[in-house]
Amino acid sequence: MKKMIDIDFGSARYDELVELRYKVLLEPLGLKFLDKYRENEMSYLHIGCIESLDDKLVGGMMMIPIDDEEIRMMQVAVDGKYQREGVGHLMVAYAEQRAKEAGYSRLIMHAMLSVVHFYEKLGFEAEGDIFEEHGITFVKMVKSF
Ligand SMILES: CC(C)(COP(=O)(O)OP(=O)(O)OC[C@H]1O[C@@H](n2cnc3c(N)ncnc32)[C@H](O)[C@@H]1OP(=O)(O)O)[C@@H](O)C(=O)NCCC(=O)NCCS
């Protein structure tokens, strides 16, 4: 069974999350996670999804407050072996619940065009023009509540 957890910055679980994000998101693009970025992540909310059978982290993301209304999901990643099993849906639902509880009214993220459909199915809408970073095309996706 999969379950969602909050992850403390600097914990062993946080190291596991950094490794997972690297494997799923950065390595395929030939990018590195530099230790100097760790400090920036201290104030973010880190969440993860674990398989309770073996306590393995199978997915995770960071949540970053933008202002009083808006919070952003970043580096949403599901381990390749567990993709398309509902982990992504579970994680975004949990992120939305956390955002609501904390009083935010907009959950946003920058989605690669290839996964726009995934977020649309979860009630997000594209906003603004598409843009490029590291040679990849993104669009801002927004869900208001
Ligand atoms: C995108 C991602 C977060 C989705 O999580 P997931 O656990 O695989 O998704 P779920 O099982 O909850 O939902 C599955 C649905 O999402 C969509 N989806 C999932 N991965 C997709 C992909 N790589 N491309 C297109 N659609 C995708 C499909 O509609 C799929 O439904 P289907 O199986 O009926 O076709 C995950 O696949 C992932 O980490 N991918 C690699 C990294 C990435 O692209 N991150 C997004 C950064 S912008």
Image (cartoon, helix red, strand yellow):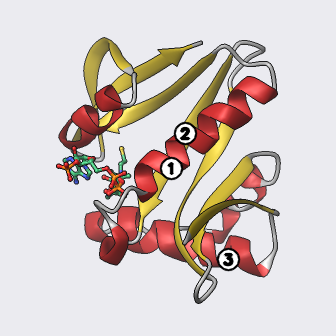
Q: Earlier in the sequence, mark 1 or mark 3?
A: 3
Q: Is residue 21 left or right of residue 45?
A: left
Disc 3 target residue: 15
Residue at image point 28% right, 63% down: 29
Residue 93 circle label = 2
Is the residue marked by circle 1 packed among few (<14), some (14-19), or many (20+) residues within 10 Å? some
Could you tell me which quadrant the C terminus lies in? top right
Q: Quadrant of residue 126?
A: top left
Residue mark closest to the camera, 3 vs 2 = 2
Q: Earlier in the sequence, mark 3 or mark 2?
A: 3
Amino acid residing under circle 3: Asp
Q: Quadrant of residue 47?
A: bottom right
Mark 1 vs mark 3, CA separation in Å = 22 Å
Q: Nearer the viewer, residue 70 or 121?
A: 121
Residue 112 circle label = none
Mark 1 vs mark 2, CA separation in Å = 5 Å
Q: Nearer the viewer, residue 36 or 114?
A: 114
Is the residue marked by circle 2 packed among few (<14), some (14-19), or many (20+) residues within 10 Å? some
Could you tell me which quadrant the N terminus lies in? bottom right
Check if mark 1's residue and mark 3's residue have beta carbons within 8 Å.
Answer: no
Q: Nearer the viewer, residue 5 or 30?
A: 5
Which x, y percent locates residue 16?
62, 78
Amino acid residing under circle 2: Ala
Check if mark 1's residue and mark 2's residue have beta carbons within 8 Å.
Answer: yes
Q: Nearer the viewer, residue 47 or 145?
A: 145
Residue 90 circle label = 1
Disc 2 on helix, strand or loop?
Answer: helix
Disc 1 on helix, strand or loop?
Answer: helix
Residue at image point 82% right, 46% down: 43
Regarding residue 113, the answer to whether it shows in the image is yes
Which x, y percent locates residue 66?
68, 23
